[in-house]
């Protein structure tokens, strides 16, 4: 995205707090983000109106790194590799396969295409991909577990390519799914799709959470609270956090050039989780099925573009 400057009126629309502050203090930091005092900076300009640099404001206030056009292209390339990796795995999913084999495929495919699997050794994670079966919500560690007919399995791929990160996951059927497996997978997929439909400048992070929570709960399912979507691209997990629950109109307003994941984890039963003794594997407390879908998305001037477009 080209760096954009917005006038004060637009910036106030973005941050309602500013509506109550008609004047800037002479000795306050200049709202343009220069780091100078207002009286040494925009106060000296004709009219004294600061040109708010909204990207500087987002960096200072929220630690959000708005991406440049070159960054977006780099993340898009990493995203293509993630999507190809997911397709490769999907083609091989079958009963009798171990989660360890999926790890080997992802690890080797990623290296062969010039990428690095981001999960490997990330905060001590021992494998190259997260593989989460049935009641496992997320962060399943590949190993001995064998896929059975009727299981659902989530494969979460994060790849670094030329220093850029992209992160996406899908939940797959193993063999023939039963009605509960079908339902939870369809609900989770629809949650992500509804969330992406509200990604747009001036809509807020709370709008995303609400789109997900409202639909999931209307279907009698529940939304996991402990894990959230996240800024991504220059690092694995950046600001802001993207909760998959919330209220419309609350939280940070989206601006073009923001890149983050949306990755709702939806439980068939209750929302509570438990972490296993390996300190990673998150499972539903009630043992019910859990499904997840994730994409890395870019906020564009008129909406949303997936940088990991595994659909279509
Ligand atoms: N890919 C996960 C996410 O969507 C994070 C996995 S962290 C790991 O954010 F260490 F388990 F890989
Ligand atoms: Co993620
Ligand atoms: Co992920």
Image: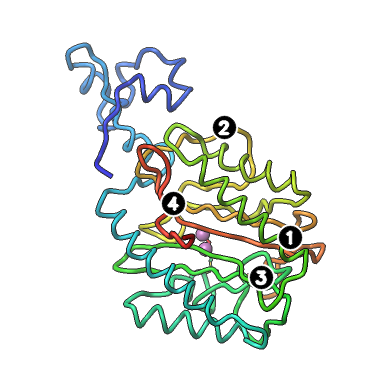
Q: Residue furthest right?
A: 286
Q: Residue at x 80, y 57 (%)?
A: 269
Mark toward the start of the polypeptide (4 vs 3): 3
- Between marks 2 and 4 in the image, the one whose residue lies nearer the viewer: 4
Q: Are the residues at dot 4 and dot 1 in contact (C-beta closer than 8 Å)? A: no
Residue corresponding to mark 4: 297
Say which mark, if any, is on residue 250: 2
Q: Residue at x 46, y 67 (%)?
A: 158
Q: Nearer the viewer, residue 45 or 168?
A: 168
Give the secondary structure at mark 3. Answer: loop
Asked whether, in this view, residue 228 is left or right of residue 216, the answer is: left
Asked whether, in this view, residue 103 is left or right of residue 215, the answer is: left
Residue corresponding to mark 3: 281
Q: Nearer the viewer, residue 32 or 148?
A: 148
Query: Disc 1, ligand 1: is the CB inside 8 Å?
Result: no
Q: Nearer the viewer, residue 84 or 42?
A: 84
Q: From what the image shows, is residue 19 above or below residue 111?
A: above
Mark 4 vs mark 1, CA separation in Å: 27 Å
Mark toward the start of the polypeptide (2 vs 3): 2
């Amino acid at each position: 995205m080209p760096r954009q400057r917005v006038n004060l009126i637009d910036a106030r629309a973005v941050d309602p707090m500013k509506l109550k502050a008609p004047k800037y203090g002479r000795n306050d930091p200049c709202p343009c983000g220069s780091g100078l005092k207002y009286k040494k900076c925009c106060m000296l300009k004709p009219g004294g109106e600061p040109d708010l640099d909204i990207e500087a404001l987002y960096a200072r206030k929220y630690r959000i790194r708005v991406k440049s056009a070159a960054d977006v292209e780099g993340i898009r390339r990493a995203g293509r590799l993630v999507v190809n990796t997911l397709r490769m795995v999907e083609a091989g999913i079958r009963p009798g396969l171990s989660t360890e084999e999926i790890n080997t495929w992802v690890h080797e495919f990623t290296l062969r295409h010039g990428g690095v699997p981001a999960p490997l050794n990330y905060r001590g994670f021992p494998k190259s991909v997260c593989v989460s079966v049935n009641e496992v919500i997320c962060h399943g560690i590949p190993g001995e577990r064998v896929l059975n007919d009727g299981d659902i399995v989530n494969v979460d791929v994060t790849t670094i390519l030329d220093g850029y990160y992209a992160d996406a996951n899908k939940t797959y059927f193993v063999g023939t799914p039963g009605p509960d497996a079908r339902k939870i997978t369809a609900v989770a997929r629809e949650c992500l799709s509804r969330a992406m439909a509200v990604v747009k400048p001036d809509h807020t992070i709370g709008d995303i959470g609400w789109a997900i929570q409202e639909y999931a709960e209307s279907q009698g399912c529940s939304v996991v609270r402990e894990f959230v979507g996240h800024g991504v691209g220059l690092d694995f997990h950046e600001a802001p956090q993207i909760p998959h629950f919330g209220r419309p109109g609350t939280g940070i307003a989206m601006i073009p050039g923001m890149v983050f994941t949306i990755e709702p984890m939806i439980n068939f039963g209750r929302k509570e989780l438990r972490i296993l003794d390996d300190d990673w594997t998150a499972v539903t407390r009630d043992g019910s099925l859990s499904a997840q879908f994730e994409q890395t998305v870019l906020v564009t001037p008129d909406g949303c573009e997936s940088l990991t477009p595994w659909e279509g």
